[in-house]
Structures are given as C-alpha cells and as structure tokens.
Image: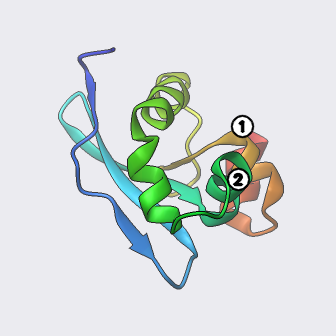
C-alpha cells in the first residue's frame, strides 16, 4: 500500500447519482472517488445495497483506485472513477475520465 494515499472511512451513498462517493487523501490533499451502483452490482451481485457492497469489498476497490490515482486519471473536476465505470457511462464527467 502506498503511504502517500489513504482512504478515510467516510464513504457516502449518493442517491441522485446512484453511486458511492468516498474520499482519498493524496499527499495530504483530499480528492473524491466514485463508483456507480451498476458497477458494484455487476461485480458483486444484488444481495445487498451498493453501499454495503462497497464496504464489504472496500480493500479491493481501494487498491484499484490507488492505481488510478497514481496514474493521474481524474476527470476535469478532479474526481476518480474506475475505467470500466467511465466507459459504461454517457455523461460528460465520465467522458472526460475515459478520454485520458
């Protein structure tokens, strides 16, 4: 684990965006990471609410997001998404993310 990136346990469910939003501390700066309910359900099934799925698999997801953060693949707002999540979406934020 990279010590310059930390993931505080402050994840939230975004009802409007239908996604889990969670922070990461990168060299002391706070950035925002997001994963859609669709992505969580595709990976882990429908047995639980997407926020519960995120909490259950957070260590694996944080490893993936660490790689994305280190590669600098954020959108124009400084948000981080999984590439699979970006490609599946058709909004401008995801397009900005997928284009990098």
Pointer 1 and pointer 2: residues touching (CB < 8 Å)?
A: yes
- Horizontal placement of 75 versus 28: left or right? right
The residue shown at (46%, 26%) is 63
In the rendering, which numbered label is found on residue 81?
Answer: none
Instruction: Give residue 81's position: percent from left, percent from top.
Output: 58, 48
Could you say which quadrant of the image residue 39 lies in? bottom right
Does residue 18 lie above or below 26 as drawn? below
Instruction: Give residue 19's position: percent from left, percent from top.
Output: 54, 67
Does residue 59 lie above or below 93 as drawn? above
Q: Quarter holding the N terminus?
A: top left
Number of disc labels: 2
In the rendering, which numbered label is found on residue 96?
Answer: 2
Tell me the residue that label 1 is attached to. 100
Q: Which residue lies furthest to the front in this view?
A: 47
Tell me, yes or no, if residue 33 can be seen here.
no
- Horizontal placement of 3 versus 93: left or right? left
Q: Nearer the viewer, residue 41 or 28?
A: 41
- Horizontal placement of 29 versus 88: left or right? left
Q: Which of 75 and 19 is in front in this view?
A: 19
Instruction: Give residue 33's position: percent from left, percent from top.
Output: 45, 50
- Horizontal placement of 11 versus 27: left or right? right
Does residue 15 lie above or below 2 as drawn? below
- Circle 1 sits in a helix, a strand or a loop, which is it? loop
Instruction: Give residue 15's position: percent from left, percent from top.
Output: 49, 82
- Circle 2 sits in a helix, a strand or a loop, which is it? helix
The residue shown at (72%, 37%) is 100
The residue shown at (74%, 53%) is 42
Could you say which quadrant of the image residue 94 lies in? bottom right
């Amino acid at each position: 684990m990279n010590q310059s990136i930390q993931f505080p346990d402050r994840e939230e469910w975004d009802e409007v965006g239908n996604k889990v939003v969670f922070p990461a501390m990168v060299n002391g700066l706070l950035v925002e990471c997001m994963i859609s309910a669709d992505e969580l359900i595709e990976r882990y099934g429908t047995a639980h609410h997407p926020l519960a799925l995120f909490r259950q698999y957070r260590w694996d997801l944080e490893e993936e997001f660490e790689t994305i953060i280190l590669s600098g693949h954020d959108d124009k707002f400084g948000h981080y998404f999984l590439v699979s999540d970006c490609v599946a979406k058709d909004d401008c934020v995801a397009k900005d993310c997928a284009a990098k």
